[in-house]
Amino acid sequence: MNRLVLVSSLALTLLAGCASDGVLELTLDLPPAPGGERIYVFTQARDATDNPILDEWRDDADLDGVELGTARTQDHISLRSARDGIDVNVKLTFCSTVRCSTLEDSNAPQLLYTLRTPVYVGQRTSYTLRVAAVPTTRDPSVTVIDKCDIAGCVGGELRSYCRADGTHFCE
Amino acid sequence: MRVLAFSLFLLLSLNTHAAAQRARPSEANVTEARALFIAGQAAVDSERWADAVDSFRRAYLLVHAPSALYNVAYALRALGRHRESRDAFEQLLTEHDNLSEQLLTDSRRYLEEERGRVAVLMLMGLDPDSTYTVRLDGTGRSDDGQRPLLVEADPGSHTLTVRAPGVDQPFVWEGEVTEGAHVRVPLHFEEPATGAEDGPEESHGGVLRSPIFWTIVGVLVVGGAVSAGVMLNRGDTVSPQSDRVYNL
């Protein structure tokens, strides 16, 4: 019977590992490149719990940057998590290379954002992050996106996606 | 300009038939309702419609003034919550029988508009003798036995989950509905796969000692668990729409 217990335990472990996900569809509405410069927007996103926004994030998990055009560009990124209630830190770095890999990119202009609880397991949410113009400096200030600005779980384009009691429609 | 914001004296015009049958609100309630009404108007002015709904609704509960209920309905309409807005306008017109001419005209017009904006999901293929557990965007809807079962929805994206009695795997539908649309949703429930139970035959009851037998059992159980996990989780798992994905 020990073998039966072992097999059952393994099965339960595997079952537990099949977690549900929630997805935030993040749209980056990006400005045109000024003066025909070659500029890539390198977007990084991390669970804020373990990744302070002012830290440098170094790993191979990042997506390639998108090149800015002569008109506004949209980049669509899906942020998937199996955990409810996390904040998400997002960095947009405006580099000369697709992965900000050159020395001159080490101090490239950057915009920082924290999205408050944008992911809800079993739900699809969305947010459009609009950048008016290409920044010229690395700004350490963080723009916080409130959870009530994260669209989802209700139809229509609303000014707030929270109920009167402050809970999100996805909660 | 918005067709909202009735003056406060309207808030206190409680001489409707329905109101007359209720006990006159206390002075404290009237004072609180007045403050809530002002807060609701301020919320409307700054387009905080959800806050406005909350304030006007609480004001209405305190003094049952038709203007407060009208404003609840109007703010719900602005939020795109057309089902609730329709219901609020209906309540206003049925429970308050001496509305001003302007309020009556506007309420009737908006009620017709809101009725036309509510979409309906028509759930096809349900057994009339069974009762199903229906949830739209996580909120339970009753199965009253009507077939096809009609589920009202506001315009926009929705997730419908239907559970049949005795079937583990729910039916899940995700889709977009437009104003006033009637969308047919054919339902089908997949019966749980029955695993092959036949083990290798062996005489003298020695099968439990066979490593081959236990290998087969292990593969079946683990495979079944993974399949079940995938199936059970399908209803709660949302697929990314972009091929550019960050797993957080």
Image: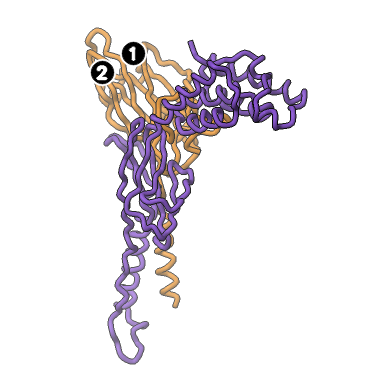
Chain colours: A orange, B purple
Number of the label disc, if any, that sits on residue A134: 1
Q: Amino acid at mark 1?
A: Val
Number of marks in picture: 2
Q: Which quadrant would residue A68 be assigned to in this image? A: top left
Amino acid type, residue under disc 2 in the picture: Leu
Cα–Cα gap, marks 2 and 1: 10 Å
Q: Residues within 10 Å of mark 1 (few under 14, many from 20)?
A: some
Residue A145 visible, this angle: no
Residue B11 versus residue A88 in the image, above or below: above
Q: Give the quarter of the image for residue B229.
A: bottom left
Q: Quadrant of the C terminus of chain B?
A: top left
Figure quadrant of residue B206: bottom left
The residue at the point 42 percent across, 68 percent down is: A8
What is the chain identity of the residue bearing mark 1? A
Contact, CB < 8 Å: mark 2 with mark 1?
yes
Q: Residue A68: which numbered mark, if any?
A: 2
Residue B77, horizontal then vertical, whole percent:
47, 25
| Residue drawn at point x = 48 percent, y = 18 percent | A141
- Residue A121, compared with residue B100, is above or below; it is below
Q: Chain of mark 2?
A: A
Give coordinates of residue A75: x percent, y percent: 29, 26
x then y, percent, for residue A147? 49, 29
Query: Compared to A167, does B208 lie above or below?
Result: below
SS assignment at label 2: loop
x then y, percent, for residue A69: 23, 16
Q: Nearer the viewer, residue B19 or B180?
A: B19
